[in-house]
Amino acid sequence: MNDSPASASAPLPSVPEKMSFLEKLSFGAGDLGPAITANVLVFFLAFFFTDVAGLPAALAAWILAIGKVWDAVNDPIVGFLSDRTQSRWGRRHPWMIFGAIPFGLFFFLQWIVPDFSNWGKFWFYVGISILFNMAYTIVNLPYTALTPELTQDYNERTSLNSFRFAFSIGGSLLSLVLALFIFEAVEDLALRYIILAGVCTVLSVLPLYLCVWGTRKRVAAMDARRAQTTQPTEAIPFFEQVKIAFSNVPFLYVMGIYLCSWLAVQVTATIIQYYVVSWMALPGAAFTQIAFAVQATALLMLFVWTPISRRVGKRAVYFMGMGIWIIAQAGLFFLQPGQVPLLYVLAVMAGIGVSTAYLIPWSMLPDVIDLDELKTGQRREGVFYAFMVLLQKVGLAIGLFLVLKALGWAGYIESTAGQPAPVQPESALFAIRIAIGPLPTIVLIAGIVLAYFYPITQEVHTQILLKLQEKRNRDRERTEE
C-alpha cells in the first residue's frame, strides 16, 4: 500500500443510527416557524385580501399565484447552492441562521393594509409576497434537506419525520388557537391580523435557532463520516443534475404523491373559511374550531401511523389514510347548512388522512436520495428537495389561482369593512362546494394510484443501503492504496 494521509486510514467517526430524543426534538422544532406562517397564510390570507384589504378575488388570485411561482423558481437555486455550501456550520445551517430574521420580518409585513388604491395594494402585496417566499425558501429548504443527512435508517427516518410533523401540526394548531383568542378579544378586523402576525413572527423565528443548536453536533459528525466514506467526484453541472433527478423514477412517484396530497390540503384550507361562513352560515369563529379539529386529529394520528408504518410499510399507511380522507372530502359537497355535528365528524376523518400527507411522502424522499447516491456517487439532497417543492408550489399556485378566479367568475361578493357580510349568489356557493368536495377528491384518488406503483419498499431500501455500504468500502480501500 502507498503512503496516504492520516485521515484516510483514521477510524470512522462513531455516529449511532438511532438519534437521541433531544436531537429529534431539536430537529422537529425547526419546522415550527414555517408551519405557523404557512398555516396562517393558507387559512387566512385569501380571506384577508378579499374581506379585510378589500381586494377583488381576481386580484387576490394573482397575488397568491405570483408569490407561489416565484417561490417555486427560487427553490432549485437555493437547493443547488446549499448542496455546495462549505462552512464550519455545515451545508444547511448557515442558511437557517442568516435567513431567520428576514423570514419573520416579511411575514409580518404581509398583514399591513396600506392606504393605497386597489392596484397600489396589489403591487405592495406582490412585492412583500416575493420577498417573504424567498426568505421562507432560504430557511425551510435547507432545513428539510437535513433529514437524510441525520440518519440513513429506514424506520428512523419515519420517526424523525414524525417529530418534524408533530411540531409542524402543533404549530398549525397553535396558530389557530392564537387566532381564536385574538379574534374574540379584538373587534377591529384589521388590528386582529396585525396582532396575530406579530405574535406568530416571534414564535416562528426563535425555534429555527433552537434547531441549529440541537443538531449541530450530529451534523458535524455525519459530515465528517461522509467525508471519509464518500469518494470525491467531479461536480455535476446544474442542468445535468436536473436531468438525473428527473430520470429517477421513484422520485417522480414521490413528487406526484406529494403534489396530489398537498393540492388537496391547500385547496381545502384556502376555501374552507368561505365554505363555513357562506355555505354553512356559521360565524367566523366556527371556521377556526373546525380547522383545529382537523389539525388536532392529524397531530394525534402521527403517533399512530408511525408504529403502523413499521409493521406494514409506508405505502400501506398512505392507502389507509387516503381512503378515510376521500370519504370525508367527498362528503363535504353533500353537507347541508344545519348539519354542524356531521361537519365536525368529517373534519376528524379528514385529519386522519391529512396526517399521512404530512408523514409519508417526506419519509419516502430520503430513500429516493439513497438510490440516487448509489447511481451517481453524490449526495444531492438539496436538488431533490428543491425540485419536489418546486413542482408542488407550481401545482399549488395553479390550483389556488384557479379556485380564487373561479370565485370571481361565479360572482363572489367581497365584504366591505364595517358592513354586514353580503349574501352570496347561488353560483358562488356552488363554486365553493365544488372546490371543497369533488376537486380535492379527484387529486387524492390520483395520489393513491401513484402510491400503488411506488417501487421502494423497506426490503428494496435495505438492499440499496447494503450496496451503498459496499461501494463506500471499495472507494475507501482505493483511497488508502
Image (spheres, grey):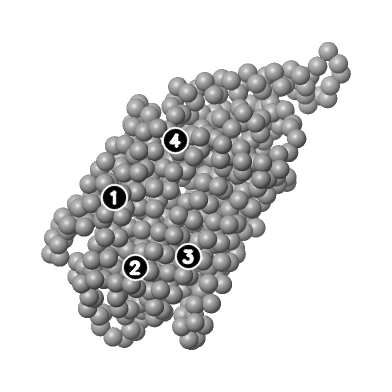
Does residue 331 lie above or below 128 as drawn? above
Secondary element at image label 3: helix
Name which residue type carries label 2. Ala
Given this view, does label 4 or label 1 mark the residue nearer the observer? Answer: 1
Mark toward the start of the polypeptide (2 vs 1): 2
Which residue carries the number 4 mark? 158
* Residue 111 point in image, percent of width and height: 46, 73
Does the rendering let one see residue 305?
no
Screen quadrant of the C terminus? top right
* Residue 1 point in image, percent of width and height: 83, 13
Instruction: Say whether residue 433 is left or right of residue 467.
Output: left
Mark toward the start of the polypeptide (3 vs 4): 3
Which residue carries the number 1 mark? 441
Does the rendering let one see residue 466?
yes
Q: CA distance from mark 1 to mark 3?
A: 22 Å
Does residue 57 lie above or below 139 as drawn? below
Q: CA distance from mark 2 to mark 3?
A: 14 Å
Mark toward the start of the polypeptide (2 vs 3): 3
Secondary element at image label 1: helix
